[in-house]
Amino acid sequence: MKNRKEQLVQLLGALAIGFAASVIMAFPVKWLWNWLIPEIFTGVAQISALQAWGLVFLIQLLVPKSGKDLNKK
């Protein structure tokens, strides 16, 4: 029973760390977007931190991590 609780704690910890990392990565995306994109493309609005987090999440879904063999089972 203890082993199952330890696994649950580890899983929740990993999820919390992953969430925190994605939120932390959202701020550089927001700053770069708000600095570069409106300057390059006229009429493009600045984005919020939540929208930047959404972009980071979308990129993580669309672009596989480098070094990962997708054909390997």
Image (spheres, rainbow, N blue to C red):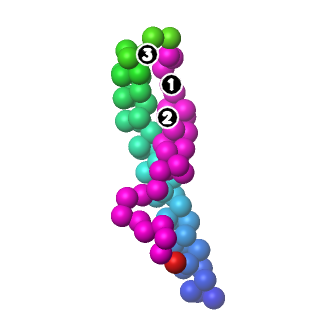
In the image, residue 34 above or below residue 6? above
Give the answer, above or below, for where 64 lies relative to 31.
below
The residue at 49%/45% (across/down) is 59
Indicate the amino acid at tag 3.
Phe
Residue 68 magenta: yes
Of the numbered discs 1 and 2, the one sitting upstream in the chain is 1
> In this view of the protein, which residue sits in the foreground, 1 or 37?
37
- Quarter of the image where one finds residue 31: top left
> Is residue 20 visible to the viewer in this orientation of the structure?
no
Residue 61 pos. (x, y %): 54, 51
Residue 21 coordinates in the image, percent (x, y): 43, 51
For mark 3, give the secondary structure: loop
53 with respect to 65 (left or right):
right
Q: Residue furthest top?
A: 42
22 lies left or right of 40: right
Query: Where does the magenta region start and end?
Result: 44-72
Instruction: Please give the residue where the numbered disc 2 appears in the rendered image.
Output: 52
Secondary element at tag 1: loop
Counting residues from the N terminus, which is met first, the one under dot 1 or under dot 3? Answer: 3
Q: Report the residue marked by disc 1.
A: 47
Tag 2: residue type? Ala
The Cα–Cα distance between marks 1 and 2, rounded to whole angstroms, is 7 Å
Front label number (1 vs 3) = 3
- Does residue 23 show up magenta in the picture? no
Query: Which residue: 50% across, 11% down?
Result: 43
Mark 1 crowdedness (10 Å alpha carbons): few <14, some 14-19, many ≥20: few
Q: Quadrant of residue 36?
A: top left
Mark 1 vs mark 3, CA separation in Å: 14 Å
Identify which amino acid the numbered label 1 is placed on: Ile
**On residue 41, which mark appears?**
3
Residue 48: % across, % down: 51, 27
C-alpha separation, residue under disc 2 versus residue under disc 3: 18 Å
